[in-house]
């Protein structure tokens, strides 16, 4: 029986250590959310669900959750439509100008969030979009567009350019070719980009702090305020619910593939 090499043991151990480093900090919030104290700490005398009760009974937390979900859905729809149209157009052109446009669209990923948020604030003040859902959705759409375009471009990389040309030679118009040939090929990237756009919007905090005041309260903003004001353990309960929801979605996705 062949023994595993030292290099293989080293790589496997390193992979498990990295995985533990990424996962364990998220799992710590689970016992903290069950604390019987009024501050962030491990349970002392008994496990308590009062912070979960506080989340479901406090209208502020529920409104913030709903508003984050609502903004995330709107952002996903707008970013997916715009990013898909942009990506398909650049794929058809396949020129130097389209390549430059693709790189320009990716710049929001490279620019620090504080710089982006400051730009949003200065521009949104002039447009009267400060502390509005519309302003947040527009800002999040701009932040999510690169993720959609990258996903759609990756899906279109496997599409042979001769297939749309064949459809055109058989009499299909440009819209018919796009809808019947290109869009089905790009569908996996479109769905992936929509998921990424929703996640980017749901988790975004820096821009929200810059362009909102009191009318718009998202869940990350409520968590931030809970940390700044009185370190409310309810944020641990919220974090636990988000982790569990993520695990359920990942499990559902894996079961669907199998």
Image: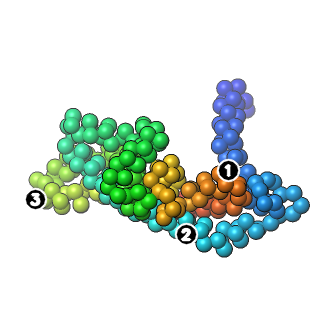
Q: How is the image coloured?
A: rainbow
SS label for mark 3: loop
Distance from disc 3 to disc 1, alpha carbons, whole Å, reads: 55 Å
Between label 3 and label 1, give the one nearer the viewer.
Answer: 1
Label number found at residue 26: 1
**Count of numbered tags:** 3
User: Could you tell me which residue is drawn at 80 percent across and 66 percent down?
Assistant: 48
Would you call the spot at circle 2 few (<14 residues within 10 Å), some (14-19), or many (20 or more)?
some
Please tell me which of labels 1 and 2 falls first in the chain: 1
Distance from disc 2 to disc 3, alpha carbons, whole Å, reads: 52 Å
In this view, the residue in front, 199 or 87, is 199
Locate residue 135: give its quadrant: bottom left
Determine which residue is flagged by label 3.
Answer: 171
Question: At which x and y percent is residue 113?
Answer: 47, 42
Please tell me which of labels 2 and 3 falls first in the chain: 2
Q: Is residue 45 left or right of residue 253?
A: right
User: Could you tell me which residue is drawn at 11 percent across and 57 percent down?
Assistant: 170
Q: Is residue 32 left or right of residue 44?
A: left
In the picture, the quarter occupied by the N terminus is: top right
In this view, the residue in front, 116 or 121, is 121
User: Could you tell me which residue is drawn at 26 percent across and 36 percent down?
Assistant: 100
Question: At which x and y percent is residue 155?
Answer: 35, 48
């Amino acid at each position: 029986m062949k023994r595993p090499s030292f290099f293989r043991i080293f790589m496997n151990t390193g992979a498990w250590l990295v995985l533990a480093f990424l996962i364990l900090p998220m799992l710590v919030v689970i016992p903290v959310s069950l604390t019987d104290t009024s501050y962030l700490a491990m349970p002392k005398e008994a496990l308590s669900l009062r912070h979960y009760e506080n989340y479901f009974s406090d209208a502020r937390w529920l409104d913030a959750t709903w508003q984050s979900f609502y903004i995330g859905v709107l952002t996903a729809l707008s970013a997916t439509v715009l990013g898909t149209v942009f990506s398909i157009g650049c794929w058809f052109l396949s020129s130097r100008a389209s390549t430059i446009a693709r790189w320009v669209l990716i710049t929001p990923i490279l620019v620090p969030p504080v710089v982006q948020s400051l730009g949003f604030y200065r521009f949104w003040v002039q447009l009267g979009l400060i502390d509005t859902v519309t302003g947040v959705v527009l800002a999040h759409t701009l932040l999510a567009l690169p993720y959609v375009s990258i996903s759609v471009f990756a899906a279109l990389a496997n599409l042979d350019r001769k297939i749309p040309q064949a459809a055109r030679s058989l009499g299909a118009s440009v819209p018919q070719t796009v809808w019947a040939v290109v869009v089905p090929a790009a569908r996996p990237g479109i769905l992936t980009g929509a998921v990424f756009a929703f996640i980017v919007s749901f988790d975004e905090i820096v821009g929200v702090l810059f362009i909102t005041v009191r009318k718009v309260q998202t869940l990350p903003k409520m968590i931030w305020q809970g940390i700044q004001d009185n370190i409310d353990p309810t944020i641990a309960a919220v974090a636990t619910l988000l982790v569990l929801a993520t695990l359920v979605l990942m499990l559902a996705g894996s079961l669907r593939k199998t």
